[in-house]
Image: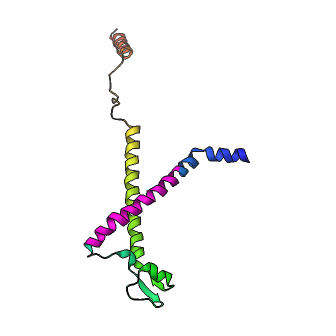
Amino acid sequence: MINEFKDFIAKGNVMDMAVGIIIGAAFTAIVTSLVGDIINPIIGLVSGGVDFTNNYAVLGGDLPAGASLEAAREAGASVFAYGAFIMAVINFLIIAFVVFMLVKMVNRVKAAAENPDNVAPEVETGPSELDVLLEIRDSLAKAK
């Protein structure tokens, strides 16, 4: 059983998956920072300073006016956190776009590796020396 486990772990697909998960976790921190520190302020600037993350509607419970989403949740109020949902959608779109660009780049690199430009195309050289000699022989045989 231990040997089977070693064989399973040593397979390339498992190792590739592990590397992908680790890089994906690190990539999440980058995307979170991109959205929180760069895109949200731009959206807030365009929309007049609105910060979507604290936008919510109270469905039930008593809250003081202007309470943050975190304070509303801690108070146990039932809230419809549409701002957090909007930010999750923005995060998804950014991640999907970046993954699309990565896949496109990898496919381009793979295609270049499979068909390198520095390989000379096959050039037709014409008939070989043997072909010419055989043709001459056949012509002489017909002439007799």
Task: Please state the horizontal and vertical placement of residue 56, each as a whole percent of the image.
Answer: 40, 82
> What colouring style does the render use?
rainbow
> Residue, x 37% and y 65% (percent of image)?
35
Task: State whether the magenta stretch is mostly helix, strand or loop.
Answer: helix
- Vertical position of residue 135 compared to residue 72: above or below: above
Name the foreground residue: 72 vs 112. 72
Name the foreground residue: 140 vs 59. 59
> Residue, x 38% and y 65% (percent of image)?
93
**Residue 3 sits in quarter:** top right
- Vertical position of residue 117 compared to residue 109: above or below: above
**Residue 89 sits in quarter:** bottom left
> Residue, x 41% and y 56% (percent of image)?
99
> Residue, x 36% and y 35% (percent of image)?
116
Residue range (magenta): 19-45
- Vertical position of residue 128 compared to residue 45: above or below: above
Check if residue 23 falls in the magenta segment: yes
